[in-house]
Image (cartoon, rainbow, N blue to C red):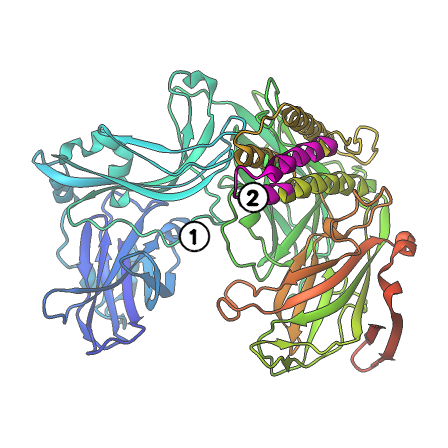
Amino acid sequence: MLRLVVESAKIDPPLTPPPRSCVSVNFRDIKKRTHVVEGNDPIWNETLIWHLWNRPLENDSFLQVTLQDMGSEKKERFIGLATVVLKPLVKHPRKVHFVKDLNLLNHSMSQTDCTITLQVAHMTHRDIEKTGYKDSLGITTREAAKQKVPLPSSAMQRALCSKPQHFQVRVRVFEARQLTGNDIKPVVKLSIGGQQQQTRIKMGNNPFFDEVGGMGFHLPLLLKQRLVGSSPTASPGHSLLRKWLGLCQPNKPASGVTGYLKVTISVLGVGDQAPVDQKLPYRADDTEVQIFKSAAVPIHMAYLQFFIYCAEDLHFRKLQSANPMLEVELIGEKLKTHVPAPTDNPIWNQILTFQIQSPISFCRKQTACQDEIGTASLFLNQISSTGEEIEGVSSGFLPCFGPSFLTLHGGKKAPFRIQEEGACISDSVKDGLAYRGRVFLELITQIKSQQDSRMKDLSHEVTMIEKHRNRQKYGLCVIFLSCTMMPNFNDLIQFEVSIGHYGNKLDLNYKPLVSTTQYSPVIYDGNIYHYVPWYNTKPVVAVTSSWEDVSFRVNCLNLLHFTRDRLKANLNTLKSMRNPKDPALLRQWEKLLRELVQDCKRPLPCMTDQPAATNLDRKRWQLRSLVLQELAQKAKHAKPRDMVATVEGWLYHLNTVLPEPQISLPDVMIWLMAKEQRVAYARVPAHSVLFSQAGGLYSGRFCGKIQTLLLQYPEGEGQKDTLPAHLRVCMWLGNVTDSKDLQLLRQGDMVVYAETVSSAQGPGRSTGVGVGG
């Protein structure tokens, strides 16, 4: 049976007069209530029991919790509602699921400040005997179990009544992935019982919708199952929550799955409450996938093999020693490596093999000991190709990766934001802000009829030369020019610059570097904001680090970014011309086409002759070259019709081949610190400030140039809708042998004001380095 303990609630803002609060809970069409308690902070400590009979809990089982005011003169006043998903009880049936301060939603499904605290547990008859009569939480569990309960057959008979009744089919469309086609503009059309609705038109092969549609009917409830199939009505709450639908062509189902659509489907009768989904529309931990598809679609089996070699920089703050283990999760299935001896640089040399139905969406890795250390996500649309990126016949390629390092992140997360139209939704998935080490691995995909083992050891003779190949010493130089638009800080502040673990002053496992600015106060600017008084003396931060040589990848990536950025700038200029009869409009169109053809004809750095290039490097180089050739041909024959829509399609097409999953250089992190605590951050991709000997087009966009960074608070911290700081910096990253080309420090005189060394507190830090104007 299912036991729910309703502990307390908090109504904020408080209601006047104080409400007479009552909690009603619905589970599998059986509703139960607590007694009435007066006040804005009611405490019940009351136990509610549901008998499960022969229907065990499922992954999508849930409780619908509603808080009401029974003291209203006319009728019960609604305060808020919430959904408690029972999936944790399915995974761990012997544990109690604590739900503390769960935020309630209002009528518009917006989050309120009202909260409720609950306890949910799955209990057997033996558990009931153990509780006895000394249960302090409300009535005893034994007494609650003896309460009269309705038999499940009564609800089923009511659902199969042949009398016509009103009911509604509600569908929420979240997103689609891996839609086949080139330059497509997908739209979802719902057709139920002769009624039709459709979503807004989107762009690309992985569109994000998050739209809700509903259709009403007046039919016998016996037909409820025939309309949408037996799955929604047989599911808890007559709903399918966050399920993936495998799409196929209705006239050619044998051609296989042509994409995936994520939906929630609910069948609601009169008085039924739709299940409340309190998750974000898109979450990184939404990885347990169950796909519904037509039985006529053939199943193609593939085997993904992860060659897990080793990891580095896995430092543990709380534990003196730990046994790190790597866990790989793929569409809900998890495999783990063995646990080596305690070390910060473990060597596994193992193969983890997944049997999957292709195509699939993404996989996720995490390294953990007793607690999670860090995570990283690999999106298969970045490490494979369906062949739809270019027109004509293209077979694409199967998922592959490495051998290369994959960077792990953990700790505080960036705030969730829906990306702009046409952006890759994977950019909004955050694994954390803190660098937690790197994993050296390789991924290959094989199509076989049989596979011997799902997990086996690699030979210890596996060469680890790849791990140390072409390691170079990199230098990172950052000049802080100004910091404005800040809120008031009562304490002195400073900025920390780090790349990986290098420069992280809080990580005592590494030698301290000149990675922080001097402590400075913030001064009121006389209007609204505050600023840092650097004036004519600008702080300089210099950090040295050691990484692999990835210049051949970054050169190709930066050249693509240059092409994309120039196309986007020309498009923005084109959009700014409102008058279609403006003679400058045609000149701008011709300039856009001319520069696009020029950029697309510029060859990408060849990967075939690079000894360190992986199979994925060569495959993506071929794909990117074909895309550029196709765009050049389209630009040559383009007509001045639908100019903005045409260029937006080209831009989206270019963005699909832009991500580079094998950059092993971590991002550059700039942290605003106060009282030795990290307050706000700015994240700068390493490739955007990396210097290249091949020339300016192959160097990062902001290498040696002034850029503006808008700092932001980590998720759940800081004042809402408040900007932490407006920072202007000049950055340079490159091989230390190329530092002779560093022009940043020649604009002023370098001065070292002080150098302090404290033997009692360990190695000191050089501070007070600046450029005098």
Magenta residue span: 570-598
- State the residue at coordinates (17%, 41%): 167
> Dot 2: few (<14), some (14–19), or many (≥20) neighbours within 10 Å?
few
Residue extending farthest left: 163
Residue 368 in sight: no
Considering the numbered disc 1 on the image, is that residue within a helix, a strand or a loop? loop
Q: Which residue is mark 1?
A: 280
Residue 297, picture quadrant: top left
- State the residue at coordinates (55%, 32%): 646
Residue 750, picture quadrant: bottom right
Please provide percent x and percent y for residue 657.
64, 35
**Compared with residue 570, is residue 723 higher up or lower down, i.e. above or below?**
below
- Pick whichever, 594 or 721, lies toward us: 594
What residue type is disc 1 on?
A: Leu
Residue 577, numbered label: 2
What residue type is disc 2 on?
A: Met
- Count how many numbered circles sit on residues in the image: 2
